[in-house]
Amino acid sequence: MLQEELMPATKEWFGEWFNSPYYHVLYKHRDQEDARFFINKLVWYFGFTPQDKILDLACGKGRHSIYLNHLGFNVTGLDLSEQNIRAARKSENNRLHFDVHDMRQVYRERYFDYVLNLFTSFGYFDSDADHQKALCAAAKALKPEGKLLIDFLNPYHVLNNLVSEEEKEVEGLQFKITRHLSDSGFIIKDIHFVDSGRVYHFQEKVKALTYERFLAYFEVAGLQLVETFGNYALDPYVAESSERMIFVLQNKPQQARC
């Protein structure tokens, strides 16, 4: 009988899954061209300068931080996964730094000109309080009038186009993936596969946070909405059809309530 290897119940799912080597196997084909296209758009939109301090919040293995630094910018990448940061640090230099850090805590107060949270690296927490805490921490890391970008899935589009079951073969592993919306409002992805006689089960959870819910978070954090885009080409956001909710916010610390 095959033994199933489950995540420890005491750990938050993202701490376990993002540190797993299987996470990087499953997502090894993520499109670098799309990512660079978006970063280039942001460089144009914000008009980054070499003097600006940019924070890549929840940076993974640092692919976006590294590319921004390659373009000449001063970047710090933060991620909760020690394995991700260990890999990212191989690319460090005097204008590119990486640290293990929980986004719910303030990293450096009033230090950054820009904070970027890219490719749905938010919405992972079980409680609204933790989501609010993370946004307050991001705002506190910004200089007054600094800018925050939150790139999140558009829940209306995702739920209308949800693929409930699929299989993917990557590096000889057969991943069986199911998706559903939980009663508590999370988009759940269950990932099952077998490796060396063991059956593994990981789970991803992203809260289907609405546009209105984000606006409430922003108000408490003292973040003023500047624009909302609906895709990586920075076209206007349309609730019913846009693939993304990309928020551009300006820090107004005098208005914060956290």
Image (cartoon, grey):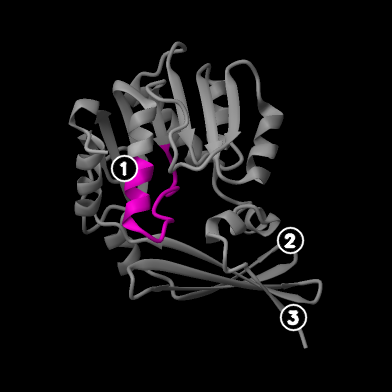
Q: Which mark is residue 246?
A: 1
Q: Which amino acid type corresponds to the residue marked 2 in the rendered image?
A: Glu
With 223 as the anchor, is 80 left or right in this view?
right
Work out whether mark 1 precedes mark 3 in sequence or the reverse, and give the earlier one: 3
Percent x, y for residue 205? 45, 63
Q: For mark 3, what is the residue?
A: 3
Q: Secondary structure at mark 2?
A: loop
Circle 1 Cα neighbour tier, 10 Å, few/some/many (<14 / 14–19 / ≥20):
many
With 200 as the anchor, is 178 left or right in this view?
left
Identify which residue is drawn at 28% across, 40% down. 247
Q: Is residue 129 magenta?
A: yes
Percent x, y for residue 141? 39, 28
Identify which residue is drawn at 55% across, 22% down. 69
Measured Cα–Cα span from mark 2 to mark 3: 21 Å
Nearest-to-viewer mark from 2 and 3: 3
Q: Is residue 145 magenta?
A: no
Q: Which amino acid type corresponds to the residue marked 1 in the rendered image?
A: Ile
Identify which residue is drawn at 40% across, 25% down. 109
Nearest-to-viewer mark from 1 and 3: 3
Q: Secondary structure at mark 3?
A: strand
Q: Which mark is residue 171?
A: 2
